[in-house]
Image (spheres, rainbow, N blue to C red):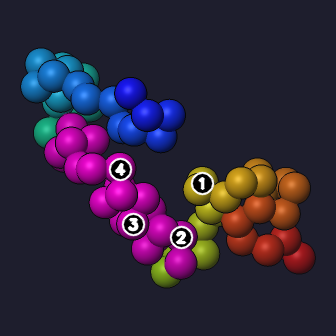
Amino acid sequence: MAMNAEPEFSEAYFEHLAELFGEERAAWARLPKEEREKELRWYHENFNTPDDLAEWPPELDGGVGNP
């Protein structure tokens, strides 16, 4: 398995997520990693949220610039 390869989960795992968190969150978890990151990036760019994908945390000036 490659270092950056996304792990594969069984359908039972996603069914369990749906039971715990709801079908909407389970459906989002089923998306490929690239699709999830694309959606997160869109939210960060359009709603000025801290960038969870940043290399550095917000308090170290990662994501949205700190005034």
Marks 2 and 3 in Cβ contact (< 8 Å): no
- Residue 31 vertical position relative to residue 63 in the rendered view, above or below: above
Characterize the local packing of mark 4: few (<14), some (14-19) or many (20 or more) Cα atoms within 10 angstroms. some
Q: Residue placed at 53% from the left, 78% from the top?
A: 45
Q: Determine whether 18 is above or below 31 in the image.
A: above
> Is residue 25 among the parts visible in the rendering?
no
Q: Is residue 2 left or right of residue 19?
A: right
Q: Which residue is tagged 1?
A: 52
Mark number displayed over residue 14: none
Where's the N terminus, which quadrant? top left
Do the numbered discs 1 and 2 sit on residues whose CB atoms are within 8 Å?
yes
**Disc 1 versus disc 4: nearer the observer:** 4
Q: Is label 4 in a helix, a strand or a loop?
A: helix
The answer to which of marks 4 and 3 sits earlier in the sequence is 4
Q: Which residue range is magenta in the image?
A: 24-45
Residue assigned mark 3: 38
Tell me the number on the disc at residue 33: 4
Q: Position of residue 59 (x, y in %)?
A: 85, 54
Horizontal side, residue 8 vs residue 19: left or right: right
Q: Position of residue 37 (x, y in %)?
A: 42, 59
Question: Between tags 2 and 4, which lies in front?
Answer: 4
Task: From the viewer's side, name the closer residue of 51 and 23.
Answer: 51
Q: Disc 1 residue type? A: Asp
Do callouts 2 and 4 mark residues in contact (Cβ within 8 Å)? no
Marks 4/3: CA distance?
Answer: 9 Å
Number of callouts:
4
